[in-house]
Amino acid sequence: MRQRITFLQEPQDSLDPKLLEVTSDSISTKELKAAREDRVTFGFDELPQELYRVLKASHELHIRWVSPNNYNTIAPLVSRLSPGLHLFYTPQRNNNGSNLLCPMLKKVFGDLDCQSPEKSFTTLPVERFALSAATQYYQPLESLHDLVEYGQHKLCQSSDQECLSRISSLLDASSVDIDFDTISHALTITAFWPPQTRHLSVKNTIKNTRLEVGILSVESPKEPEELSLGGFLTVVGEDTKPSPTLFSFPARHHPTGSTFSASFLTPTGMHPTLELGISSSRPPTEERSCSLHAHLTLPRAIFVDKYQLSDQLLLASKNLSAVHYITTPVDLEAPAYAMTLWGSSVLVELAPPSSGAEQPWTEQPWTAAIPLHLRYLPPTSSTSGQSPLHIPYPVVFWACVADEGSKFPINPFDRVNLGYDGLFGPKTMFYHLPPEGDTLINTITVPVLDLDKSKYVELGTAGVVLLGFLWVGWCLWRVWSRNPYGSGANKVAKEKKKQ
């Protein structure tokens, strides 16, 4: 097992290394204002047998969970995803072990609507670039209670209070990543907590385990595509004092000064419109070609009609430029309760307004609108005939072309397999717009059949059918009684026989 704990600070919050207390098995200080990232790497022999069997049948498995509560980021940990549980999966070839994946996910994360990768997952365009897994799955998930309970029982000893405490702290994390691939043959868990003032006390309670603690702050980089970090590193159990460090690396993800909001126009109806409010149309850099995008992760109850968004006049009227990707296939008619696929994802390029040829951008806020469509939801037993639908915020970012010589994999904080990065070239930099608001979930109400009132519809329908049957029978009887064709024909036949 290898452990890496990184505290990231703003330059004005930098800590004096003299305030750090380093012992043979711990490092501590009283107050530290910083964001925190924990990364733990497990070997195959350290994993539960049931989890080992799932990973052995996987070529790569990437799980991303993001909290529905808004949070602040800090460079270089600025990449974002829509809130909820994301899974990107590629099975081993000629291996039938993929049927173990969904039962394992339910055991770790709770009651997920996952039947099997063949039925519930959607495919990704892996033929374009190597940054994408083969399939994708998503489900809204507010908390990691089930993951914490599983980790405490399967990954920690009952007497190891440090391990139990660190697993429990995942309940307060803003994002958690779980990564596995056949090249590394290791499972890595990475958790992020946003900046706050905290008491630092980290112990290494496991023998023969490397625990590295870094306290770093952002420095001014030499190149626009780079990030620089400086501070102190300590290997707990080996170092007697922190060691100063300063390093730079090309970064795939960068922050921006702009923000965005996401809300639905009212009334929503069965064809709601998602409105994105952007604080500025100014690109993050004018030295490179950049385009603004929104990546939507839509549960199965709501979808985008790709045929509607193929109309260029409609796109222009909504401040949209093009739709670059929509999950296929997307059934435009099926109700939500008849589907097994998790939903769909959409990549839309936005069209920022410009103030003229000399300045092709404006600092004024502007909006873009994305038309969506609802599916019929399962009937409920509510008296209102309305059902709430929770739709996660999209991710909004500028995609800019990096220099040919940039090599992002050397970044120790690199983050890939986010769903949208595989839709761009490997030399793309992403400048993320942070969302506004306290929560990253929009809730709308959808009209559904009320089961408490449907009995009147059923009785009324049965009554109308019965009345219609009686009316048809009465009409047939009237015709027969007035003109009994059968009896007249028999009488004529008898008279002919007598003659």
Image (cartoon, rainbow, N blue to C red):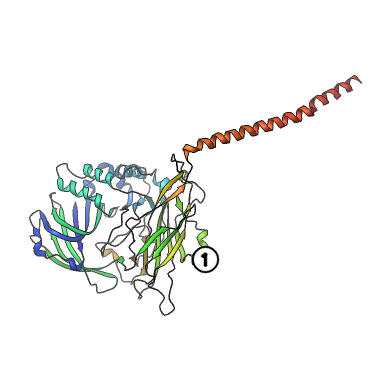
The spot of residue 5 in percent (x, y) is 19, 57
Which quadrant of the view contains residue 475? Answer: top right
The spot of residue 244 in percent (x, y) is 13, 66
Q: What residue is drawn where x is 22% and y is 43%?
A: 154
Q: What residue is drawn where x is 50% and y is 58%?
A: 306
Q: Secondary structure at mark 1?
A: helix
Q: Which residue is mark 1?
A: 312
Hey, which residue is sitting farthest right in the picture? Answer: 499
Most foreground residue, 239 or 343: 343
Height in image: 41 above or below 241? above
Most foreground residue, 89 or 324: 324
Q: Is residue 126 visible?
A: no
> Left or right: where does residue 491 sit relative to residue 304?
right
The spot of residue 443 in percent (x, y) is 40, 52
Q: Is residue 242 visible?
A: yes
Report the amino acid beneath label 1: Gln
Hey, which residue is sitting farthest top in the picture? Answer: 498
Q: Residues within 10 Å of mark 1 (few under 14, many from 20)?
A: few
Quadrant that contains the C terminus? top right
> Left or right: where does residue 459 sit relative to residue 63?
right
Which quadrant of the view contains residue 259? Answer: bottom left
Q: What residue is drawn where x is 18% and y is 46%?
A: 164
Which quadrant of the view contains residue 250? Answer: bottom left
Hey, which residue is sitting farthest front in the picture? Answer: 383
Q: How many marks?
A: 1
Height in image: 89 above or below 246? above
Height in image: 481 above or below 386? above
> Left or right: where does residue 44 sit relative to residue 26?
right
